[in-house]
Image (spheres, grey):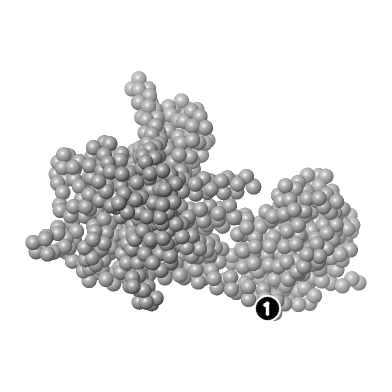
Amino acid sequence: MERIVIAARQLEVSYGGTQALRGVSLDIPARQVTALIGPSGCGKSTFLRSINRMNDLTEGVRVRGSLTFHSREIYGPDWDVTDLRRRVGMVFQRPNPFPMSVYDNVAYGPRIHGVRGRGRLEGIVEASLRAAGLWEEVRDRLKKSALDLSGGQQQRLCIARALAVEPEVLLMDEVTSALDPVSTARVEELICDLRERCTIVLVTHSLPQARRAADRTAFFLSGELVEQGETARLFTLPRDPRTRDYVAGRFG
Amino acid sequence: MMSLGRRIYSGAVRLMLWASASAVCALLLWLSGCVLFRGVPGLSLELLTSQESVLHGTVGILPAAVNTLFVIAVTLALVLPLGVGAAVYLSEYAPSRRLAGAITFAADALAGLPSILYAMAGVILFCSALGLQKTLLAGALTLAVMNLPTVIRSTQESLRAVPRSCREGALGLGSGRWHMVRTLVLPASAGGIATGCMLAVGRVAGESAVLLYTAGLSTAMQDFTSLRGMAGASGATLTTVLYLYAKERADFAAAFSVATVLLALQLAIHLGTALAGRRRRR
Amino acid sequence: MTRRWAERVMGLLFLLCGLTAVALLALIAAYLFLSGLPAIRELGLGPFLLGRTWDPDTLQFGILPLLLASLWATAGAVVLGVPAGFFTALFLAKAAPPRLAGLVRGAVDLLAGMPSVVVGLVGMTVLVPLLRERLSLPAGDTLLAAILMLAVMLLPPVIAVSQDALAAVPAAYEEASLALGATPEETWLRVTAPAARSGLAAAAALGVGRALGEATAVLMVAGNVANMPSLLSSVRLLTTGIAIEMNYAAPGSLHRQALFSIALVLFVLVVLVNILLTLALRRGRGAR
C-alpha cells in the first residue's frame, strides 16, 4: 500500500454561507496522479485550493473537518503558510508567468526561499526547465520576456517555476483548458513524467485527460465526493449511477 | 519554517506601508489642526459679512467671498459648455481618429502645465491683448482655459462608458446624432460630467497663482448689480486675500480665519463630489 | 424640418466648441513661447541660462541660481515625497482593510484639495520658525522649507496615480507568487510593483512636474533671495522668480520680458517631463 500524503476527513468548506464542500473524505497517495473530475461548480477546485490554503485569500471562507498533509492538520495553528505552499505547489488554469524574463520567472521561487549564488540558481533554473520539457526551446532566450512565449510554452514555464522550489505535491487546476490541442498533449505527457518527482492532484473537466494521465480519479458532484478509485476501474465499472451517467457524458 | 530574515523583511515592509499611510493622515490632521486652532477663534459673523474698514481697523472678507463665488460661477459657465461640447465633438462627431487623438494629446499636455504658466498666459492674452485689465473676468477666463483639459477628459471618460450598442441602436432607428446625444448619451454621462465640474470648482476655489496676477487685489466690495459692473469688477478672492494678509501685511490672525473658511469650502466641495460619485454609481 | 435644422446647428456648435478648445490651448502654448523669446534674444541664451546674477536694477538677468534652486528643490521633494506616496498607494491598493482604505483615501482627497496658499501659510507660520529654532539659523526661509512644502504638494497626485497602477496589476501574478510560498509583502514588492512599473514611473514624473511648477506655497517659505542654492539658505526658484516680481515689473521693460523668458524655460522643462511621462505610459502599454 502506497503512503498517503494528503488525507481529507469529513471536510466542509463554505464561502459566506454557501456550502462548497460537504463532508468530503479522500486519500491522496504519494507519487501518483490523482484526477478530480465533475461538472463545474461541483467543488473540485475548492478542494484543490484548500490543500495549499489559497482559499485563505477568498473573503468569508470557513473550513471544518480534517485535512492533513503528512498527518499534520493543514488548517492547524502550527503551519507556516509560506512553508506549506513551498511544499505544495500550484499551477493555474490560465498561464500566468510574471512579466519578467524566463530566467527570473523560474528563479523567483528559489530566490524568495533564500537560494543565493549565480551557479546554484542557474543549476536550478536549467534543471526545472528540463523537467518541464522546455529547456531546449528557451535555452537561448532565458533573458527574454516570458510574455513573448506561446501559450503552451508559458504554461510549461509556470510548471517549471513551480518545480523550482522542489514541491512534494503539485496541484494543477485545469491547466490545459486555455491551450490548443498540441500544447495540451505535451502538457499531459509532462504530467505523466512528473509522477516520478512528486505527487500530483489534477483538476480537469476533460474526461479523456483524466483517463490518459491519472492513476486514480475522484468524482465530485454538488460539493460531495460521489466515488473514487483507480482510473481504469472508475471509468469502466462505476459503482454509483451518477458516476456512470457522468463518465458516459450524459451530463456535465 | 520561514527564515528570520524573511520574517523581518516582511514585517518591515508592512510597517513601512502603515507608517507612510499614517504619516499622510497625520499630515492632513496637522495642517488642518494648525489652521483651525489659529483660525477658528478669529471667525465671527462680522468678519464674514462685512468688508474691510481702514477707518475702524477691522477686517471683513465678504467681498473676497463674493468674488470667489463670482469667479467660480463665471469659470464654470465658460468651461462647462465649452469642455462638454468639445468632448462630445471628439467622441461623437469627430470625423477622424487622428484628429481626435491630436486634440486629446494637446489637452493632456496642457493639463500638466503649472498654474503659474497659465497666469502668465492670462496676463498677456486676456489682461493685455483682449484689454480686460486685471479683472475677475480675466481671471475667470484664464481659469476656464486651465480647467478645460480636466472637463474635456472627465466628460470623454464618461461618454466612453456609454455602450456602443446603445448608440448604434439609436442611430439605426433613424435618430439624428444630436437627438441621440441629447436623449441618450448626455443623460447617461451626467454623473461623470458633474464629477468633472466639482473637480474644476475645487481647483478654482483653491487656485491662487493665476488670480494673483490676473484678477487684482482690491479688498473693497465690487459692483455686481450691472453687467458693466461685473465686467469691470477687480479684486481679491479668498485665496489671494489670504496671501495678501499673510505675506504683505503679516496679519496672521486674519489669514488663518480666511484659511479656515477655505478649508470649509473645500470640505463642502469634497462632499459634493462624493455625492455626485455615489449617484453615478447607482 | 425644424429637427433637421436643430441637428445641423448643434453639429456646427459642437464643432465650434472643439475648435475653440483647441485654439485656446494652442494660443496659450504659442503666446508662452513667443513672449519668452525677446529677452532671450536680447540677452543671449548663454548669459541668460548660465548668468549667476539676477538684478533688475542693473539689468542683469542670469537665471542659473533660479534654475539650480528649482532643480534641487524638485529633486529633494521627489526623494522625500515619491517613496512616501508610493508606499501609501501600496497600502491603499493592497494592505489596508477595505474600510480603513476608504478613510485614508478620503484623507488623501482632502489633502489634494488643500489650497496651496493654506499649506504655504502653515509653512510660513509654523514650519519656518520651527526650522529657525531647531537648526539655529538666522532665518528659517530656506531651500529645506521649500523642499518640505513641495513634498507635501506632490503627495496626493503621486498617491492617486500609483494606486491606480498598482490596482491594475492582474491578480493572477500575485496568486502565482503566493502559491510559490512568498509572503504578501514579498509579492507586492517583487511582483506587483515591477509589473506596475510604467504606471509608477508616470506617477513619479507627475510628481516631478508638480514640484517644478508649484509657486504659491513655496513663495511663502523660500525667502526668495536669488542665491546660488544651498540647503539652509534662502533661495528663489523659477516659479517664485516669476511670482515675486510679476506685479512690479513695468510693462514693456526688459525686466518683464525676462520674466516671460523664465516662464518659457519652465514651460520647456515641464513639457519635457510630460513627454517622458507619455513615453513611460506608452511603453507600459506596449509591453502588454
Q: Is residue B77 left or right of residue C229?
A: left
Residue found at x 50% / y 36%: B101
**Residue type (three-letter) at the residue carrying disc 1:** Leu
Label 1: element kind: helix
Q: Is residue C190 left or right of residue B155?
A: right
Q: Nearer the viewer, residue A15 or B270?
A: B270
User: Residue farthest to the right?
Assistant: A1
Q: Is residue A192 above or below residue A179?
A: below
Q: Give percent across and percent down for residue B57.
A: 12, 64
Q: Is residue B227 left or right of residue B85?
A: left
Residue found at x 38% / y 67%: C233
Residue C230 occupies quadrant:
bottom left
Q: Is residue C108 visible?
A: no
Q: Is residue B237 above or below residue C132?
A: above
Q: Which residue is mark 1?
A: B4
Q: State which chain disc 1 sits on.
A: B
Q: Give percent across and percent down for residue B21.
A: 48, 68
Q: Give percent across and percent down for residue C128.
A: 34, 70
Residue found at x 23% / y 37%: B131
Q: Give percent across and percent down for residue A172.
A: 77, 59
Q: Is residue A132 above or below residue A167?
A: above
Q: Is residue C131 visible?
A: yes
User: Residue farthest to the bottom?
Assistant: A78
Q: Nearer the viewer, residue C71 or B245?
A: C71
Q: How many marks?
A: 1
Residue found at x 70% / y 75%: B2
